[in-house]
Image (spheres, rainbow, N blue to C red):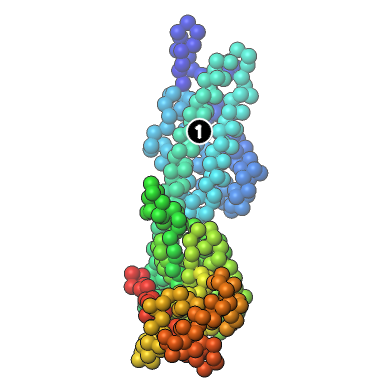
């Protein structure tokens, strides 16, 4: 590179009288070897590469990078797009191989350091201006390389992620629809586990979604991102999911068959749901079921119905399976019996305080003192309300036979006010 030296005379950058681009070109094979050695010693992922790749493709990329910098020293012009194409393609290959982007960027910094050391080894006290100019060029070249490498790396990563997302979506659709699961897996190169744990999720709103001046769309997307990250963090294998800000369905692969899923498996998943709720800052009601791949459509329906029953019966947020809501599930099935049961309790809806007291009394195991503590009223008030409820409905919840009918009637009444969410958009 010519620059204006003392007296306005154009000079090539040189150390000890030898042009810098010539020094790099003459030292190219040995310099590239030193760069490779440092990569193996200081960037662990390169030490795991096959020797053929390291001494073949990677060495050629290193040599090309050094040659491009030598050309920049000679002409003063940064590499153009055609010269950078090979480096961009190399970065894309590393992304495809799963090499971390920080390792790829670090490799170019290692190369730049070796080039600078190669030149500075020949600098004399009279070359100070040239040293300063060469250092600036190294930084400019490194900036250009970093931008190129990162752009190539993430362009490939986006393509890979897009293909991976398409594969997951195709597999999820095949499983939920019950259509050609094995064929879909073969086309996309995916494994089919012996079983999936099915989650149907209903997600409440984050407080930020209702704040003035805050975009509810952005707040919901932040919540959704946290849900996905937390779910993937707590489960093994590739999760297939269709989630939105208000919930959706997720299929978690399981290494055992449906008949060998244990209580511990469900406890781990319940813990994952609890963490998702905490991190997302929103209530989550979840229904769960397990099934072999061919039985996923029925399992999705069951998980949705279990989640609906748990919500309708005023259970707290969390994960529920059929055994957790067995009685309510049966009582809430549509039909004339359910309508008759709901009719037994419907007169109490005009007196919400009476209905709430009956609910609390059942929840507290027919214990009037515990009921009073929960409602923060005197036990005599509980007694009075239960008597009034009995007069209005004709059912006395304090007696054994009527208590069962009251519980069934409340479940039937709750079923009328809640409807399952559809997953037709999967």
> Taking 78 as reference, is 3 above or below it?
above
Q: In which quarter of the image is residue 39?
A: top right
Would you place residue 369 above or below residue 58 in this image?
Answer: below
Viewer-proximal residue, 358 or 327?
358
Where is residue 127 shown, x and y percent of the image? Answer: 58, 15
Q: Where is residue 320 in the image (x, y as percent from the top left)?
A: 52, 76
- Residue in the image at 57% along x and 83% along y: 366
Foreground pick, 17 / 205: 205
The picture places residue 253, in percent across and down from the top left corner, at: 52, 72
| Residue drawn at the location 46% of the way across and 21% of the way down | 1
Front in this rendered view, residue 369 or 365:
369
Q: Give how far across and how far down residue 286 sits, in percent.
A: 48, 72
Q: Please say whether residue 152 is visible from this viewpoint.
A: yes
Residue hosting label 1: 142
Asked if residue 69 is positioned above or below residue 45 in the image, the reply reads above
- Residue 164, located in which quarter of the rendered image? bottom left
| Number of marks drawn | 1
Name the residue at 54% across, 38% down.
108
Single out the residue that lies furthest toward the left. 424
From this viewpoint, is residue 198 visible? Answer: no
Crowding near pointer 1: few (<14 within 10 Å), some, many (20+)? some
């Amino acid at each position: 590179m010519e620059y204006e030296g003392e007296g306005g005379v154009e000079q090539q950058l040189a150390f000890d009288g030898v042009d810098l681009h010539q020094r790099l070109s003459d030292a190219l094979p040995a310099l590239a070897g030193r760069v490779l050695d440092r990569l193996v010693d200081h960037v662990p992922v390169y030490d795991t590469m096959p020797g053929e790749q390291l001494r073949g493709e990677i060495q050629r990329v290193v040599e090309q990078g050094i040659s491009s910098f030598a050309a920049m020293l000679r002409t003063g012009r940064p590499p153009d797009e055609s010269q950078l194409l090979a480096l961009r393609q190399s970065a894309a290959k590393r992304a495809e191989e799963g090499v971390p982007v920080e390792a790829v960027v670090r490799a170019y910094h290692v190369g730049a350091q070796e080039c600078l050391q190669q030149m500075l080894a020949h600098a004399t006290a009279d070359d100070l201006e040239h040293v300063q100019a060469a250092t600036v060029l190294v930084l400019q070249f490194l900036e250009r390389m970093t931008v190129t490498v990162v752009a190539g790396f993430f362009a490939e990563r986006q393509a890979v992620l897009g293909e991976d997302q398409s594969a997951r979506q195709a597999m999820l659709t095949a499983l939920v629809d019950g259509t050609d699961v094995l064929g879909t897996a073969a086309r996309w190169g995916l494994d089919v586990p012996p079983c999936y744990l099915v989650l149907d999720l209903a997600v409440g709103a984050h407080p930020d979604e209702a704040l003035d001046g805050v975009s509810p769309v952005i707040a919901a997307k932040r919540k959704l991102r946290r849900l996905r990250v937390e779910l993937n963090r707590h489960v093994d294998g590739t999760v297939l999911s269709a989630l939105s800000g208000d919930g959706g369905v997720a299929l978690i692969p399981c290494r055992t068959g449906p008949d060998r899923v244990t209580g511990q498996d469900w406890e781990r998943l319940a813990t994952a749901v609890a963490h998702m709720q905490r991190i997302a800052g929103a209530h989550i009601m979840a229904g769960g079921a397990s099934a072999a791949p061919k039985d996923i459509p029925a399992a999705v329906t069951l998980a949705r119905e279990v989640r609906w029953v748990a919500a309708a019966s005023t259970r707290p947020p969390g994960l529920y399976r059929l055994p957790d809501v067995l009685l309510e599930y049966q009582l809430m099935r549509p039909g004339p019996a359910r309508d008759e049961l709901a009719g037994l309790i419907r007169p109490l809806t005009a007196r919400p305080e009476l209905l709430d007291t009956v609910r609390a009394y059942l929840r507290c195991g027919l214990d009037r003192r515990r009921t009073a503590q929960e409602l923060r009223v005197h036990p005599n008030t509980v007694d009075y309300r239960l008597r009034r409820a009995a007069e209005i409905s004709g059912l006395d919840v304090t007696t054994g036979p009527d208590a069962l009918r009251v519980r069934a009637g409340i479940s039937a009444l709750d079923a009328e006010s809640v409807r399952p969410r559809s997953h037709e958009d999967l």
